[in-house]
Each structure stands twice: as structure tokens, then as C-alpha cells.
Image (cartoon, rainbow, N blue to C red):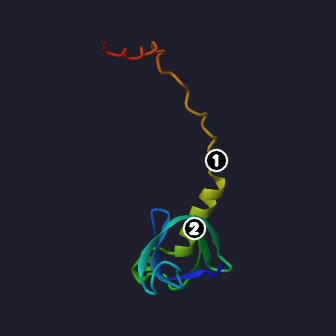
């Protein structure tokens, strides 16, 4: 699978936001918001989301101006995702409907 590059990126509510290049569903330069971030590899400068891997290009200049280290936020999101407790599966639905009387079959009119 080929990674998609994302330029002028920022992080918004646990997702990447920026211009994608090489995305199979969006044209080059289209601004998108990804699915939730699930991992970050600082050495490779890649971010994994629920649906794919993104190679990080340049950081959005306004976003980076407001943060000392934009990559730190990615690391914190990925670390929080790894340390989050796994959700226990919920039991299936329980039949609590009241018992009903059988419905009588209609009698033919004579």
C-alpha cells in the first residue's frame, strides 16, 4: 500500500487536516480531515489513522506558530490511543418484552 502525503497539516480533534497528495479517493491538493489518528512514527514522519498511513509534509505555518512542537501533539495522541483501555464487548440484547397472548386467527365470515 502506498502512503498518502499530507501537506500544510495540522491536528484537529485527534485527526489530521491538510492537503493530500496521492490519495486514492481525492485529487492532489484537496483539503481533507482524516479519520482518527491511531499511531505516529517520528522517525519515518508518518501518521497512521483508522483507514491509512500518511507521510507528513510541511506543517501548516499558522498551526506550527501556535505550538512549540507540532510533532509532540501527534506523539501524545498516539500514546493516549495505545494506553486507552480496550472497551469490553457489551452483552447482546436481553429480551425483556412482556409475554403476549397469542393472537387469535380471524374466523371466516359466514
What x and y, as percent, mark residue 85?
A: 64, 47
Q: Mark 2 points at which residue?
A: 51
What x and y, as percent, mark residue 56?
A: 56, 81
- For the N terminus, the image quarter is bottom right
Q: In this view, does 89 lie above or below 103?
A: below
Mark positioned earlier in the residue sequence (1 or 2)? 2
Q: Residue 97 has which mark?
A: none
Q: Residue at left 60%, top 37%?
A: 90
Q: Residue 85 has which mark?
A: 1
* Within-10-Å neighbours for mark 2: few <14, some 14–19, many 20+: few
Q: Is residue 69 among the parts visible in the rendering? A: no
Q: Residue at left 56%, top 62%?
A: 77
What x and y, as percent, mark residue 34?
A: 49, 70
Q: In which quarter of the image is residue 110?
A: top left
Towards the viewer: 42 or 86: 86
Q: Residue furthest front?
A: 110
Give the CA distance from mark 1 to mark 2: 21 Å
Q: Residue furthest right?
A: 43
**Circle 1: element type:** loop
Whether residue 25 sits left or right of residue 81 in the image: it is left
Towards the viewer: 4 or 105: 105
Q: Residue at left 45%, top 84%?
A: 27
Which of the two discs, 1 and 2, sits closer to the camera? 2
Q: Quadrant of residue 22?
A: bottom right
Q: Is residue 89 above or below residue 77?
A: above
What x and y, as percent, mark residue 44?
A: 67, 80
| Labels 1 & 2 near each other (Cβ < 8 A) | no
Towards the viewer: 11 or 92: 92
**Circle 2: element type:** loop
Q: Residue furthest left?
A: 110
Amino acid at each position: 500500500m502506498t502512503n498518502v502525503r499530507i501537506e500544510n497539516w495540522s491536528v484537529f480533534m485527534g485527526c489530521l487536516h491538510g492537503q493530500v497528495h496521492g490519495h486514492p479517493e481525492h485529487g492532489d491538493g484537496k483539503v481533507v480531515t482524516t479519520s482518527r489518528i491511531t499511531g505516529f512514527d517520528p522517525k519515518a514522519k508518518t501518521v497512521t489513522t483508522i483507514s491509512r498511513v500518511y507521510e507528513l509534509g510541511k506543517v501548516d505555518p499558522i498551526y506550527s506558530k501556535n505550538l512549540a512542537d507540532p510533532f509532540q501533539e501527534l506523539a501524545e495522541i498516539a500514546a493516549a490511543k495505545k494506553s486507552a483501555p480496550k472497551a469490553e464487548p457489551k452483552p447482546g440484547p436481553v429480551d425483556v418484552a412482556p409475554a403476549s397472548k397469542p393472537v387469535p386467527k380471524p374466523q371466516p365470515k359466514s
